[in-house]
Amino acid sequence: MTRMCHCGHTGTMDCDDEVMLTVRIAAAERALLRDLARGQGGDVSGVAVDGLLEVIPALHDDGSVLPLLRVLARPAPCAVTLWLPAEVADLLPLLGERLVHAGGSALGPASAALSAALRLWLAGDRAVLAAGLARLHGGCGVARMPVAA
């Protein structure tokens, strides 16, 4: 993983420590991610981080690996680049190792884990995802989030 901020600096020069990763998702998942970001008045990276913070704690046991493997088995033709805080990105290789040990893809533990966790979160009900983001951000964006696709 390359540590670089979203403005292109490596290291910690005048920027928070961020990691750039590319995630593979389906077109519908990409559209939902963009809609959620628009509804929150933010960017897709911010929404992805919020989603990861919601879903990763639920993936603490071996029984949670099976849904991740199912998500990874579905086609994901779209590549989306995300900027993650280093603290969040540092959790992904551990989850990726669990995926590989359970028979998952050996693409790159961090990228595979990010793809699986994000796709698992995006598989939730659109209205529930929007409401969760609104609660996380103190009610911002609830009226702006389109509920029907």
Image (cartoon, rainbow, N blue to C red):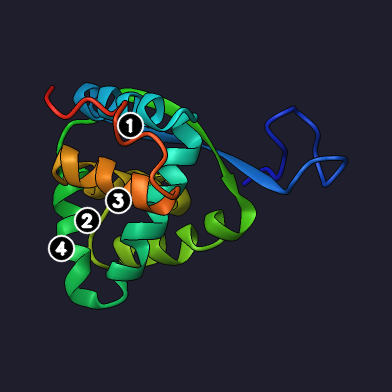
Tell me which corner region of the image, top left, top right, bottom left or bottom right, holds residue 53.
bottom left
Residue, disc 1: 36
Q: Are marks 2 and 4 in contact (CB under 8 Å)?
A: yes
Q: Secondary structure at mark 4?
A: helix
Q: Amino acid at mark 1?
A: Leu
Q: Amino acid at mark 3?
A: Gly
Which of the pair 146/45 is nearer the observer?
A: 146
**First of labels 4, 1 by sequence position:** 1
Which of the pair 36/11 is nearer the observer?
A: 36
**First of labels 1, 3 by sequence position:** 1
Residue 144, given in percent of the width and then of the height, sits at 32, 26
Residue, disc 3: 132
Residue, disc 2: 68
- Cα separation, mark 2 vs mark 4, equals 5 Å
Q: Are marks 4 and 3 in contact (CB under 8 Å)?
A: no
Q: Is residue 124 left or right of residue 138?
A: left
Tell me which corner region of the image, top left, top right, bottom left or bottom right, holds residue 2.
top right
